[in-house]
Amino acid sequence: MTAPDLPAALAPDARLPAEPWNDPKATPLIKIRNVIKRFDGFVAVDDVWLDIYKGEFFSLLGPSGCGKTTLLRLLAGFEQPTSGTIEIDGVDMADVPPHRRPVNMMFQSYALFPHMTVEQNVGFGLKQEHVPRREISRRVGEMLELVQLADLGRRRPHQLSGGQKQRVALARALIKRPKLLLLDEPLGALDRRLREQTQFELVNIQETLGLTFIIVTHDQDEAMTVSTRIAIMDRGRTVQVGTPGEIYEYPNSLYVAGFVGDVNVFEGRVVEAGKDHVTVRSPESGCDIYTDRGIDAVPGQEAYAAIRPEKIEIGKAPPADARFNCVTGRVFDIAYLGSLSTYHVRLATGEVVKVSAANRSRLVERPITWEDQVWLWWPPSASVVLLS
Amino acid sequence: MSGQPAQTPAPYVSPGPQTTAFEVLERTTSAFSFYGVLARFVQWLERSGRTLVIALPFLWLGLFFLAPFLIVLKLSFSETVLAVPPYAPLVAWLEENGLSYLTVRLNLSNYLLLFEDSLYVRAFLNSLRISAVATFLTLCVALPLANAMSRAPERWRALLLMMVILPFWTSFLIRVYAWIGILKPEGILNAVLIGLGVISEPLTILNTDIAVYIGIVYSYLPFMVLPIYASFEKMDPSLIEAAVDLGSPPIKAFWTITVRIALPGIIAGCLLVFIPAAGEFVIPDLLGGSETLMIGRTLWLEFFNNRDWPLASAVAIVLLAALTVPIVLFQRHQARRGGTDGAS
């Protein structure tokens, strides 16, 4: 399901870790085949087909109600698919109850057992396997060390902060070294700063232990930060599956483009389409938009040109070549974010274009301000033409 | 008392000791005026409002629990006489050899009799046994019931709860009476079982301990279901999923997680059944046989048939003491757990 013709910049690179999803010989750890889950009258998961490979940090990203949590619960075995099959490590999971699956889950509510200490919570999974007590306490100690909670082992969950509870839940889910760890909004309850710090820790732990993680999230930044690949979901379907770079740079639909990051969309019609270029004429922008990446379209077809705000240049003078990819308008709003400023520019057609620029100089020396007449232009590689 | 003199303004106020004297006078007199009293009362109320709020339940308990209890306690130490009321006073004024004595005669023979006569000991032990077995049976019915209720779709739960509570709207006595019609040899149960061909001879259930168990389980089930349901219902369902996910089979997870966390509710339910069942009189009297010896029934017989109020009181006191023990143990248990129940 990767983009049909991968641009050179994203092709497998010797410096990057292996990308098993691009290797036709690699066997996926998890095979999800045409899985449908219906709850009375409502389709939560609609014909999902996914391959997830060993060692991946795979994100299911989508708004609430898009079926991502249901898909996770299908993998854990708490729900049975209405049709379709799920295979984990070559074994069909249809008849395997949740307590026998080589899968552990970290719950959104953490679901720590309130009557047990941190140590007992973490050791619970091993105790179910009748691991000797000495062995349990050794491995619990190691695991608490890993999540930096070594000195809180005797506390009970109600004596812990949110971040500590999150770590206990993670340690408890990791202690059995599952083939697959499912994380349901693992960082949703943490505040922003802690969340960012924990994201990196999660990735470190995943790489240290060499496990496969599937994470459910509605936070695009989180998905972009931690994932090897992301599946964008909408109304039970996977809309696009790809690396964070592919999803961001080459979204396959307006939905994906709008869900991940900010985007300016110009509606128009295809003027000319070739193997390596497309020109879209958009009355909204008032100029022709030339893209150096071909799509399968015929002239006259309705199309959308999507351009990320940070890929647009802004200046008070027109660029040298203003035939393509250049519009003009007035600044009517500036959002100052410290490192960046986002300029909202209203074109003559009434369309508002967002442009973000790094604040390399100090604010007092800001060259562009409200009501300035500005020109916006971008290179052919900045835009993507979408048909839906 | 009117505050008239205080309210007339002084024609001349000179500095010095006279003023002080006048002020003192004013303060004292105004304190007795109607508004002064009212103001002081409101002030006192504001200051001690909290005390009042706390005092109210104590007053209630003192009036309707402690006072009757003390009367019964007093009765249990007195002697039986053929009189109205049928007991001798504890405190008497005695004149002997020209000297006067205030005598307090504590008659311990009632208590001694309880422990000497095997009838009472057996009645006690039997009550505790029947009550314990019945509590266990009630728990066996209530656990799956409460579990099913807490897992039912939310829109059904109010209805299910209603169905558990509804029998309370009919008289307890009538409901127990109805069981006679069901359990008697030619009753509904036997008719159905014979009709189905399960048995050929009617079963003797009525007037046995089994009938008493059935009566207690039926009558006290709501007291067990409600606290257990309350603790199940507020539990995070992902707790049990987490346990299953970590390799615990669902049944084991139910016992080690759900039941363990709901333990305070379960213990509360058991106490709510065990305590009244141990002193139960109506159910053994109507459903039990002549050999179903229960202390509530013994007490009733002593009180009404033998008119031995002191002995009946002693039975009541011993029963109370015996039942206080499990409550104290429960509270100790709760205190030890400290506030760790909060499912988070």
Image: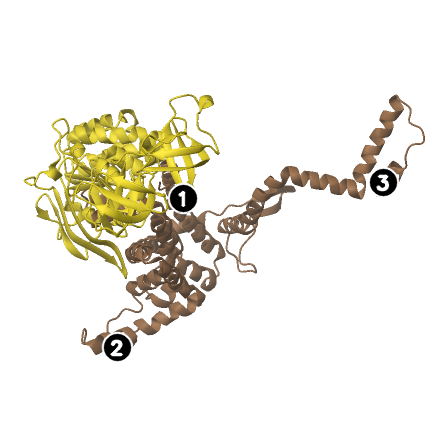
- Mark 1, other Cα within 10 Å: few <14 / some 14–19 / many ≥20: some
- Mark 3, other Cα within 10 Å: few <14 / some 14–19 / many ≥20: some
Mark 1 lies on residue: A351
Going by the numbered disc 1, the residue's amino acid type is Glu
Q: Position of residue A255 (x, y in %)?
A: 29, 47
Residues under labels 2 and 3: Cα distance?
A: 86 Å
Is residue B59 rendered to the left or right of residue A195? right
Q: Residue at x 20, y 37 (%)?
A: A243
Going by the numbered disc 2, the residue's amino acid type is Ala
Q: Residue at x 81, y 41 (%)?
A: B33
Q: Residue at x 56, y 60 (%)?
A: B83
**Letter of the chain that mark 3 sits on in the rendering:** B
Where, by quadrant of the figure, is residue B173 drawn? bottom left
Instruction: Please check whether the numbered discs 1 and 2 fall on a single chain.
Output: no
- Residue B191 got which mark? 2
**Letter of the chain that mark 2 sits on in the rendering:** B
- Residue B330 got which mark? none
Is residue A184 in sight in this rendering? no
Q: In this rendered view, identify the residue nearer to me: B86 or B123.
A: B123
Q: In this rendered view, identify the residue nearer to me: A387 or A118.
A: A387
Q: Which chain is brown?
A: B
Is residue A135 rendered to the left or right of residue B329? left
- Residue B3 got which mark? 3
